[in-house]
């Protein structure tokens, strides 16, 4: 069931009303507060007069959608996008024609390893790694997304030979608590909070460790949004709201798909109160971020500049990630015509990445081959 929360009637006096939205198919009724014009006449089948402020009026779902078709379409678009970004496992068939065709365009980085190394000849490889779904498996509880000891040892060895950064939607402190390697660069909150190595990196520039925070003035607002999201979604079974410092994340991996529309509406109702924030999506997560021109692609460019490779032709960035938000970084590499992106996915997806790997275990194999090659 898809409903609406905001209305626009230009030049009319508005009054607050409680609207009971009915859906004939599901039999579900939901009361929501909306603003309607004083002159708007909404009557029931018995033609009762329009109630005053604070009382309830009942309208059909069809009428409500006609009143606010624009927002309905937006919520519907969100739900469809939520489904598109969250493919179910049973749709993935390794021998499917779609997958085979997609693999021709985005071949395995393991199969193409020698060609990749050949392209990097004479250049400095710089590694950028997403965390969830790349270094750790996707799990139902985001607080339990631990990387294996084997993966940690592999990334530690990788950082001995190549400048290495973790670029995640998680807050920087959270992702550091998972990785626990002080010799890496960390870009949390989709690159809005960047910190350099605190020890053990020969690529570290100077004594400064905190490099960049793109949206510090938004911190109080994000805290407000986080609390509002926790409150408004508390009755939705399976939802998890996470404060990632510079963005708020709503995980719906454990939410019944039939409830996604209602959840999207709840998130929308909070977002309506904060015009300086925007909504983005990842793998079964909705994220509210500041409206600023900053993303994982910008973070990649900033880190390259910090390492002294801003306008160099002898650098070869490699970015590995599994999420829609990683596409910003893949696109930057494609436009720069430098290095390449590797998408971690078992299913075909539209992507700017050049190569693919199926899961974190293949990521670890690829990183180990890089280390062995460099040795």
Image (cartoon, grey):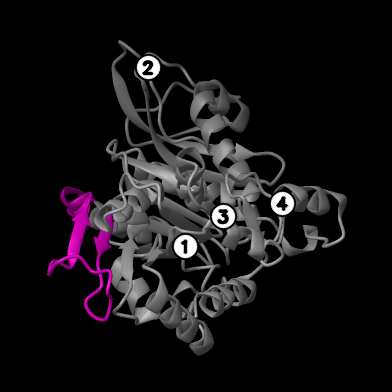
Horizontal arrangement in the rendering, residue 247 relative to residue 82 (left or right)? left
Q: Looking at the image, tell me whether mark 2 or mark 1 is earlier in sequence order.
A: 2
Q: Which residues are magenta?
A: 192-221
Q: Residue beneath label 1, please?
A: 235
- Secondary structure at badge 3 equals helix
Counting residues from the N terminus, which is met first, the one under dot 3 or under dot 1?
A: 3
Q: Secondary structure at mark 2?
A: loop
How much space separates mark 2 and mark 4, taking CA atoms? 43 Å
- Asked whether the beta carbons under mark 2 and mark 3 sit within 8 Å of each other, the answer is no
Say what secondary structure mark 1 lies in: loop
| Residue extending furthest toward the left | 207
Residue 168 position, x and y percent, is 40, 62
| Crowd class of label 3 (few under 14; some 14 to 19; many from 20; radius 10 Å) | some
Q: Residue at coordinates 40% horizontally, 70% vertically from top-left?
A: 162
Residue 52 lies in quadrant: top left
Whether the residues at callouts 3 and 4 have beta carbons within 8 Å, the answer is: no
């Amino acid at each position: 069931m898809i409903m609406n929360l905001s209305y626009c009637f230009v030049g009319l006096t508005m009054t607050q009303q409680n609207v009971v939205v009915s859906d004939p198919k599901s039999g579900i009724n939901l009361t929501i507060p909306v603003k309607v014009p004083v002159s708007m006449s909404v009557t029931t089948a018995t033609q009762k007069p329009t109630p005053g402020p604070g009382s309830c009026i009942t309208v059909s779902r069809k009428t409500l959608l006609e009143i606010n078709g624009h927002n309905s379409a937006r919520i519907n678009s969100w739900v469809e996008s939520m489904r598109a970004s969250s493919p179910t496992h049973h749709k993935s068939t390794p021998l499917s024609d779609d997958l085979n065709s997609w693999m021709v365009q985005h071949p395995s980085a393991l199969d193409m390893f020698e060609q990749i190394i050949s392209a990097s000849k004479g250049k400095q490889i710089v590694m950028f790694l997403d965390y969830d779904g790349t270094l750790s498996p996707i799990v139902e509880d985001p607080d339990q997304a631990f990387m294996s000891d084997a993966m940690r040892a592999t990334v530690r060895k990788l950082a001995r030979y190549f400048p290495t950064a973790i670029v995640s939607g998680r807050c920087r402190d959270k992702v550091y608590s998972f990785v626990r390697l002080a010799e890496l660069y960390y870009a949390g909150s989709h690159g809005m909070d960047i910190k350099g190595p605190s020890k053990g990196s020969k690529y570290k520039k100077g004594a400064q460790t905190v490099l960049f925070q793109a949206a510090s003035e938004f911190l109080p607002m994000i805290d407000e949004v986080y609390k509002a999201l926790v409150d408004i979604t508390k009755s939705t079974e399976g939802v998890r709201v996470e404060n990632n410092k510079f963005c708020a994340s709503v995980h719906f991996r454990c939410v019944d798909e039939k409830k996604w529309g209602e959840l999207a509406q709840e998130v929308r109702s909070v977002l309506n109160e904060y015009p300086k924030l925007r909504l983005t999506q990842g793998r079964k997560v909705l994220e509210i971020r500041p409206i600023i021109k900053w993303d994982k692609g910008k973070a990649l460019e900033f880190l390259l500049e910090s390492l002294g490779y801003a306008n160099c032709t002898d650098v070869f960035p490699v970015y590995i990630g599994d999420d829609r938000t990683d596409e910003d970084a893949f696109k930057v590499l494609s436009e720069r015509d430098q290095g390449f992106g590797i998408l971690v996915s078992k299913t075909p997806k539209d992507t700017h990445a050049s190569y693919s790997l199926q899961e974190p275990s293949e990521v670890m194999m690829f990183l180990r081959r890089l280390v062995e090659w460099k040795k």
